[in-house]
Image (cartoon, rainbow, N blue to C red):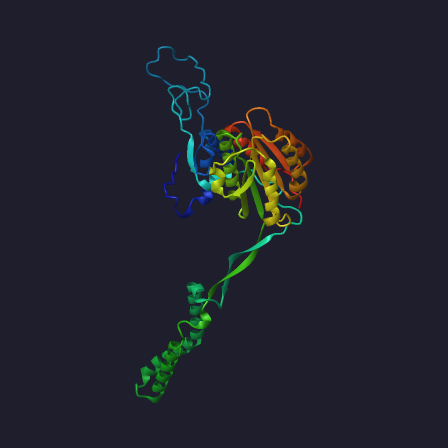
Amino acid sequence: MHHLIDRRLNGKNKSAVNRERFLKRFKSQIRDAVARSVKDRSITDIERGEKVSIPVRDVNEPTLGHAQGGVWERVFPGNKEYLRGDQIDRPEQGGGGGGSGGSGQGGGGEDDFVFELSREEFLNFFFDELELPNLVKRQLQQTITFKSIRAGFTSDGTPTNIHVVRSLRSALGRRIALSAEPMRELNEAQEDLDKLLETRSEHDPLIKAVMAQIHALKTRVANIPFIDPFDLKYSNRIKIPLPTTQAVMFCVMDVSGSMDENKKDIAKRFFILLYLFLTRIYDKIEVVFIRHHTQAYEVNEDEFFHARDTGGTVVSSALKLTRQIIEARYPSSDWNIYVAQASDGDNWDSDSPQCREILQNNLLPLLQYYAYVEITEGEPQNLWYEYEMVAQTHKEFAMRRIRDASEIWPVFRDLFRKHPEKAVA
């Protein structure tokens, strides 16, 4: 059996097709390996590549071999136990013999198959089977963008778009076509001249006439221009409309005094994962960051994750600010609107019912999806019970609890997993 090893460098994506075929074939094993790697890295480091290890038994190709069957005799030197004619039981499959696939004591073995996933490949598997729910909504207006694509060649255009090869090919074809008839006449005249020179002198008037004809034909061929403006070809590009669905995500985080550093860290990790997911999956999506304690503020990404202001808790202030921003900048007729809220659930008793009313009456009718994450180690807080009433009557509202950092990824995947049913169009 011969083994061929391809040691060529993978330059200019020469093996991209084979790699894509390999990733597709072992998709389940790679997905499991990616899931295992998530536990060993921080969320902020989630977007780098990963070395994936697949058991060698999963990548072995099936082979056909010839077993040594039947009755046979062998002589082993140093035998002190058996005599000639004794029958020896056939050893069980894989029971010994030092094969390369064994992993027992004293036997050889093979390491797992290890290869490197690029950042793009890792994220494809990491966010596999995740999506924003209900992205396409009723009466959705779409923003039309245009993409420039190649559309053959044209005879008009700018000098920067001249296609040299096509232009020279057109010029060559034109010269061949225009010179075909003169060259045929020139060859015939040359043959006539050769025949006349065999019987007549160079000063004969007939020979001079033929020579004059030959000169005229050569001049005619030489006057055919090498390239003509008619030959110039330009690369043609056209713009085709590409409708892109607009979406906006509101990230609302509680930064009150009851949110200690550990809870804030879990919330930050959840939003980092969400932000990476949104920017990875969707080309056109905007993200609005809102921090709140007794008051709510719209902030940029850096302030959202690193500002240190704190205070009491009035969750309704964040919901009211979200509604104001939607009315000012993101009309529900044009945008798919999503909200993700992270809090420890600790709120003023009088404010939690107000939050439920704002959600039911003012916010949820405008939204595609609302995800609430409560970060608490003990029993749910009063805001949780008010939100439970909302979840019972609104399918676009989802709520989950996170007790420690290890539950960030399972909760996130549960909130944004793909559903088999299609969104209402």
Q: Where is residue 164? Give x, y as percent.
A: 42, 64
Left or right, 75 with respect to 242, comes to left
Q: Quadrant of residue 203?
A: bottom left
Number of marks in picture: 0
**Position in image of residue 378 (x %, y %):** 57, 24
Q: Where residue 42 appears, x then y in whole percent? A: 45, 33
Is 130 on the left-hand or right-hand side of 220?
Answer: right
Comparing 216 with 411, the one in front is 411
Q: Is residue 218 above or below residue 133?
A: below
Residue furthest bottom as drawn: 205
Say if residue 289 shows up in the picture: no
Point 61% across, 52% down: residue: 142
For residue 143, above or below residue 37 = below
Q: Report the front residue among 414 and 386.
A: 386
Picture quadrant where residue 89 is located:
top left
Q: Quadrant of the N terminus?
A: top left
Can you give x and y, in whole percent of width and height, for residue 169 in the image?
43, 66
**Is residue 350 rendered to the left or right of residue 223?**
right
* Residue 312 seen in the current view: yes
Give the residue drawn at x 45%, y 63%.
161
